[in-house]
Amino acid sequence: MVANGDFVTFVVDDDQAILKSISRLLGAKGYQVKTFQSGKEFLDNRQPGAVGCAIIDMYMPGLSGLDVQRELVSANVDCPIIFLSGASEVPVGIRAMKSGAIDFLTKPFDAQDLITAVTVAQMNQAKACERKEMCASALQRMESLTPREREVMERVTVGLLNKQVAADLKISIKTVKVHRSRVMRKMKARSVAELVRLVALTDLRA
């Protein structure tokens, strides 16, 4: 779990009273809070690589909340979004959620609902960080494999038996077993199922 103090909550709203209210609420829970009065100000000043979420007013002068969301998605920025709206508009909320928003709260929002939404975003970010670390580790291990070991691994992870791998690569079954053993050791996989999961991680790294 990402600690509250390391999790930055970006609050984007043109209403100064809302900014102050949310800052006090989340600050009391130990969160870092950074406020912005427009979507452009947020996009121009957001720290690359910061771990956190954004609480964004759906309707603001200039860029709307959905505009900001589209910019973040387009830039491949992993930042969970909680939308705030002065009106309950189900179609807009559904569109926002389909695009990856964590929640859609109507003003005046319940304080506990907002804290719960931020907690969910924090948990999602923790899982994403863990996944990135696991992916980086799997990639590093994979880079230690020889070209032949990679060929054996590719075939083992799609379910081929040793004799099938041997026939496909035109090598002996004994040689396949040696390479397979080295692959398992270098990848630190205790089973073929675990090896498959590691390979899947690297395939999904994008």
Image: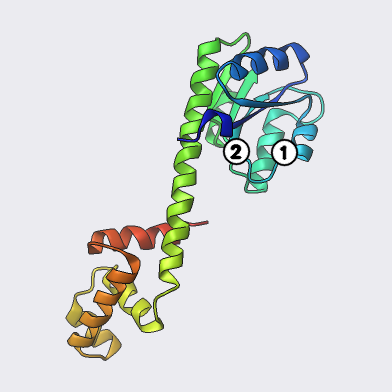
User: Which sits earlier in the primary sequence, circle 2 or circle 1?
Assistant: 1
**Image quarter of the N terminus:** top left
Q: Residue 97 at what x, y percent from top left?
A: 54, 31
* Type of amino acid under label 2: Cys
Above-or-below relation of 199 to 150:
above
Q: What SS does tag 1 mark?
A: loop
Judging depth in this view, the residue of 138 and 152 nearest the camera is 138
User: Which residue is labeled 1 in the image?
Assistant: 46
* Residue 106 position by quadrant: top right
Image marks 2 and 1: residues in contact by CB distance under 8 Å: yes
* Residue 187 position by quadrant: bottom left
- Looking at the picture, the colour scheme in use is rainbow
Examine the rendering and report whether any part of residue 134 can be seen.
yes
What residue do we see at 26% from left, 76% from top?
180
* Type of amino acid under label 1: Arg
Q: What SS does tag 2 mark?
A: loop
